[in-house]
Amino acid sequence: MYDIIIVGGGPAGLTASIYALRARKTVLLVEKMVIGGQVTQTDNIENYPGFESISGPELSMKMYEQAEKLGLKTVYSDVKSMQLEGDIKKVETFDGEFEAKAVILAMGAVARNLDIDSEREFRGKGVSYCATCDGNFYKNKVVAVVGGGNSSVGEALYLSNIASKVYLIHRREEFRAEKVIMQKVNEIAQTTGKIEIITNSVVKDIEGNGKVESIILTNLAEKTENEIAVDGVFVAIGRKPDTGLLEGVIELDASGYIITDEEMKTNVKGVFAAGDVRKKGLKQIVTACSDGAIAATEAIEMLNKR
């Protein structure tokens, strides 16, 4: 029996664990992939206070090492089911079932797909969702990055140091990415041509013989199609919350994000949510950490009143 089980080892979950452990609570962290979550896929972070520049994996490891020194227990396994109602919460994983008096949900979000058949066909054969994971396979090759937010633009910048050319494809005219990041992209596009921006376009199909060889684009404004030869496609069109197991128990919005109040409380007593998995405006590392601190503090206060 633990005081708190935290599901998800990204910045929100790690911050929550640090706060809970410092309050002398017993904590179990359940992470199905790698510590840090989607932050580990970020090559360079320049907007986290205290670090002018730091890689995602390095920042994640610093958080984890701090929690581990405080006594954090970690289980690397996927969650099969959760029983969250009642005073004792149960989290069943593929490596056993665990109980706690409170649960903090910090599962983050997973990559959205283009939702075309050829994307599934070429997944792992030229279609990727992580430039820092797979970028080195495309040294001096031509790649496409699909998306218009910070993630996609960041991937394009990272790949421009590896690939011979990067096509940055966005379905709208204007990008959602921060202006400072777009300024860097535009500078590269104008000075070296290693990044070429294509707007008002979507990927209709991906073609190749056993591996990606080209993409078919549809221009939404002109209603035309054209084919571009590429060796790889990096999909960065946003993320969706990993909340399928919570349906019918935890209140979710129409997109599947967890609804909480300002204290990170869900509709179920003793269950809190933090980070990108919950409904909120700004989804950044620093806001995930803030959520985690609040969720842990509220859980601690609840436990102390028992």
Image (spheres, helix red, strand yellow):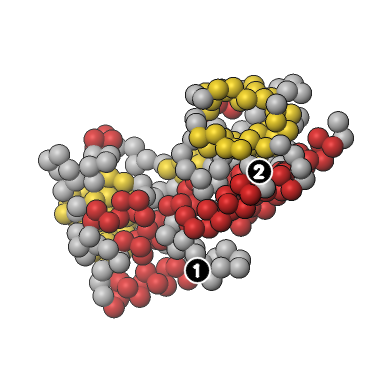
Q: How far from the left and from the top, in percent, is residue 104?
A: 66, 37
Q: Is residue 20 left or right of residue 125?
A: right
Q: Amino acid at mark 1?
A: Ser
The quarter holding residue 229 reads bottom left
Q: Amino acid at mark 2?
A: Gly
Which residue is depicted at the point 36% across and 55% down? 132
Q: Residue furthest bottom?
A: 191
The quarter holding residue 145 reads bottom left
Q: Is residue 142 above or below residue 102?
A: below
* Residue 129 in sight here: yes
Q: Nearer the viewer, mark 2 or mark 1?
A: 2
Q: Which mark is residue 71?
A: 2
Q: How far from the left and from the top, in percent, is residue 54?
A: 49, 64
Mark 2: give few (<14), some (14-19) or many (20+) Cα within 10 Å: some
Query: In which quadrant of the rendered image does the C terminus lie?
Result: top right
Name the residue beneath numbered marker 1. 53
* Residue 261 in sight here: no
- Frontmost residue, 106 versus 78: 78
Q: CA distance from mark 2 to mark 1?
A: 28 Å
Q: How far from the left and from the top, in percent, is residue 142?
A: 21, 59
